[in-house]
Image (tube, rainbow, N blue to C red):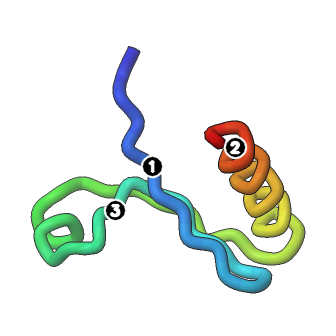
Amino acid sequence: MPTRDTKAEISGDEAFIGSENYSTSSSAENREMGLILHGREAAQLRIQFDQGWRLAG
């Protein structure tokens, strides 16, 4: 099974989920992908993230 290295940033009613690292080489040298979510979809991501965080203990 391939490894997943996904990051998410959620703020208010917007969210980003993708593979990018916070570095110059990530955006300049790698093939990265991501989605920007708004409204209900961002809220659903927040709920899913919070549930996973609670389960992780």
Q: Residue flagged by tag 3: what amino acid is it?
A: Glu
The residue beneath circle 2 is 52
Identify the element where label 3 is drawn.
loop
Q: Residue at x 74, y 58 (%)?
A: 45
Q: Which residue bears the numbered disc 3?
A: 20
The spot of residue 31 in percent (x, y) is: 24, 54
Element assignment for label 1: loop
Q: Quadrant of the N terminus?
A: top left
Residue drawn 70% across and 79% down?
14
Q: Amino acid at mark 2?
A: Gly
Compare marks 2 and 3 and give the one earlier in the sequence.
Answer: 3
**Which one is earlier in the sequence, the residue at label 2 or at label 1?**
1
Left of 56 or right of it: where is 50? right
Query: Of helix, strand and loop, which one carries label 2?
Result: helix
Q: CA distance from mark 1 to mark 3?
A: 8 Å
What's the amino acid at mark 1?
Thr
- Which residue is at a point 78% across and 82% down the rendered structure image? 13
Q: Position of residue 43 (x, y in %)?
A: 83, 67
Residue picked out by circle 1: 6
Q: Which one is in front in this view, the residue at disc 2 or the one at disc 3?
A: 2
Are there few (<14), some (14-19), or many (20+) residues within 10 Å of tag 1?
Answer: few
- From the viewer's perspective, tell me whether residue 25 is left or right of residue 40: left
Compared with 16, 45 (above or below) is above
Taking depth in this image into account, of 41 and 22 the one nearest to the observer is: 22
Q: Is residue 13 above or below residue 45?
A: below
Give whichever of 3, 51 is nearer the camera: 51
**For the residues bearing labels 1 and 3, Cβ distance under 8 angstroms:** no
Image quarter in which the C terminus is found: top right
